[in-house]
Amino acid sequence: MAYYKTLQERKLRQEIVEMGRRLWQRGFVAANDGNISARLGENILLTTPTGVSKGFMTPEMLLRVDLEGNVLSRDTAWRPSSELKMHLEVYRQREDVAAVVHAHPPYSTAFAVAGIPLDQCALAEAVFTLGSVPIAPYATPSTQGIPESIRPLVQHSDAILLANHGALTLGTEVLAAYFRMETLEHAAQIIFLSRQLGQTETLSREEVEKLMVLREKAGVPGRITPCRTQPDSVQAGELEAVVREITRAVLERLRTGEGEE
């Protein structure tokens, strides 16, 4: 059995391996896709290795790295994923984040490929947990362009779609980051299916405000950006009144022949 400095490290390694297995079982990753990382200490992370299916990892495969991406683990042939740059950007930007999950869940990634952000307040659970999910501009995987593309969004959201690539979720622990990925994919699938039925109804501003009050009372950690709601009923009524008035005026002019040359 491998030697770990603390019981905390052993437990964290087991959690990361288990979340990797769940990602693979649920079809959120294929082949060697995806990666997971977590804070082990103030300046030390545990991260998954490159070239390994997330469904077949073992705790010994995980690597210790510092916040510059330098490998601290000794006597190992494994190397961290080239996507580690994206994770490091998150930890530099957000001291409150202790775990990051990157995967390619099909429905969420389909929205990312289509260039459609998941920004509608359509599902109460998603509004409560995720808020609006933005899309980071496309950048070539494994390059510095990826952390640069998410930089403007990380401060305001714990779930981000990566254009033509996949999804990224953050959390105060590994399980929380993984659950956000599950919630993201679940919401994306429901919204996709509702669109096939012809319509996606969104919640009103008043209902969303109630959910935000509940979130605050529950002390849910993390950051969200408000999602798009239905127009206020007064505003919608005013707009209908304007349309009716314009229609009446046009019909009146046509009836009287006004405006004819």
Image (cartoon, rainbow, N blue to C red):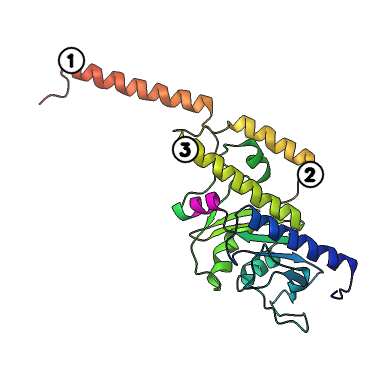
Quarter of the view holding residue 72: bottom right
Whether label 1 touches label 3, CB < 8 Å? no
Q: Which residue is tagged 1? A: 256
Residue type, mark 1 in image? Thr
Instruction: Report helix, strand or loop for mark 3.
Output: helix
Question: Can residue 155 be seen from the camera position used here?
Answer: no
Residue 224: numbered disc: none
Q: Spatial distance from mark 2 to mark 1, Cα to Cα?
A: 64 Å
Residue 108 within the segment the image draws in magenta: yes
In which quadrant is the C terminus drawn?
A: top left
Residue shown at 65% from the left, 49% from the top? 182
Q: Which residue is tagged 2? A: 219
Looking at the picture, how far across and down is residue 241, in whole percent? Answer: 41, 21
Q: Spatial distance from mark 1 to mark 3, Cα to Cα?
A: 44 Å
Looking at the picture, does residue 217 appear above or below residue 75?
Answer: above
Of callouts 2 and 1, which one flags the residue occurring earlier in the amino acid sequence? 2
Chief secondary structure of the magenta span? helix
Q: Residues within 10 Å of mark 3 (few under 14, many from 20)?
A: few
Q: Which residue is tagged 3? A: 195
Label 2 vs label 1, nearer the camera: 2
Question: Can residue 13 be seen from the camera position used here?
Answer: yes
Whether label 3 touches label 2, CB < 8 Å? no
Residue type, mark 3 in image? Arg
Of callouts 1 and 3, which one flags the residue occurring earlier in the amino acid sequence? 3
Quarter of the view holding residue 49: bottom right
In which quadrant is the N terminus drawn?
A: bottom right
Q: Residues within 10 Å of mark 2 (few under 14, many from 20)?
A: few
Range shown magenta: 105-112
Left or right: where 207 falls relative to 141: right
Looking at the picture, how far across and down is residue 148, in whole percent? Answer: 56, 68
Looking at the picture, does residue 49 appear above or below residue 254?
Answer: below
Looking at the picture, how far across and down is residue 186, in whole percent? Answer: 61, 44
